[in-house]
Image (tube, rainbow, N blue to C red):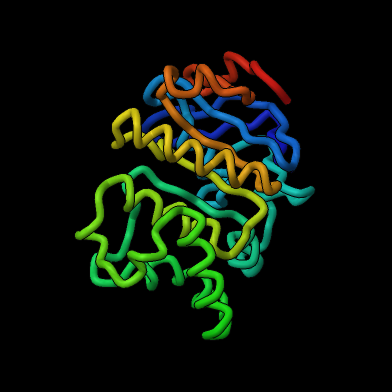
Amino acid sequence: MIRFEHVTKRYPQRGDALRDLSFELEAGEMVFLTGHSGAGKSTLLRLIGLIERPTRGQVLVNGRNLGSLPKRKIPQYRREVGIIYQDHRLLADRTVFDNVALPLVVAGYGHKEVGRRVRAALDQVGLLRRERALPVSLSGGEQQRVGIARAFVARPPLLLADEPTGNLDPELSREIMGLFERLHQVGVTLLIASHDLALIAGLPYRTLTLDKGSLAGDTGTW
């Protein structure tokens, strides 16, 4: 589903964030991406999310070369990728329902379908009863679950998560990982960037390790 072929990403003032990176992920895998701060984890996710493009090499998702994808096709591609951020990025003046509904509204779904999908997503993350709450009234773990619901409400085949448990305590972090495992069980492909080695050490999933922008390890089940 995802293939990096000798990918380098260079920034004018910072040098290479990724260096000659090659790997492949199959559809339906749940994979962790680890490495020190500045190793290139977020850059890698931004390339897959088509927020940036590689300097050299090819990033392919479902056979499409993202480096040469026309601008007019980028919005359609991004509807196939859900992104979960560490800082939630919720709209403070919108309810939980409205925050989760946003991708569906942008995509032009009808009112009834939006309601059905949003409530199904909120039920999946255990927040159906909070649909009319504002983000400020939620705990950090609840806000992260809203972010997860928003990312998969349109049922994209691929989810990217950038340090989704970075601001959570160990118990809440395990709850969030349990949510990801349930999504994995229904066939969603997940790539999760995390520096929490203790959290992922006991999980039976493949782990890619970056070091200074290069692939330093590829271990586990795949």
Question: Image check: 145 left or right of 158?
Answer: left
Front residue of this view, candidates 67 and 22: 22
Question: Image check: 130 left or right of 154?
Answer: left
- Examine the rendered structure and indicate whether residue 132 appears above or below residue 28: below
Q: Residue furthest bottom?
A: 111
Question: Image check: 53 left or right of 146?
Answer: right
Residue 206 position by quadrant:
top right
Q: Position of residue 113 (x, y in %)?
A: 58, 79
Q: Quadrant of the C terminus?
A: top right
Residue at 59%, 19% in the rendered image: 215
Residue at 34%, 28% in the rendered image: 170
- Examine the rendered structure and indicate whether residue 144 appears above or below residue 110: above
Q: Position of residue 1 (x, y in %)?
A: 74, 43
Residue 79 position by quadrant:
bottom right
Q: Residue furthest left?
A: 136
- Taking the image as drawn, is residue 54 in sight? no
| Numbered label tally | 0
- Examine the rendered structure and indicate whether residue 143 appears above or below residue 109: above
- Taking the image as drawn, is residue 200 in sight? yes
Residue at 55%, 75% in the rendered image: 116
Q: Position of residue 84 (x, y in %)?
A: 45, 48
Front residue of this view, candidates 9 and 75: 75
Q: Position of residue 193 (x, y in %)?
A: 48, 33
Residue at 29%, 36% in the rendered image: 167
Q: Residue furthest front?
A: 129
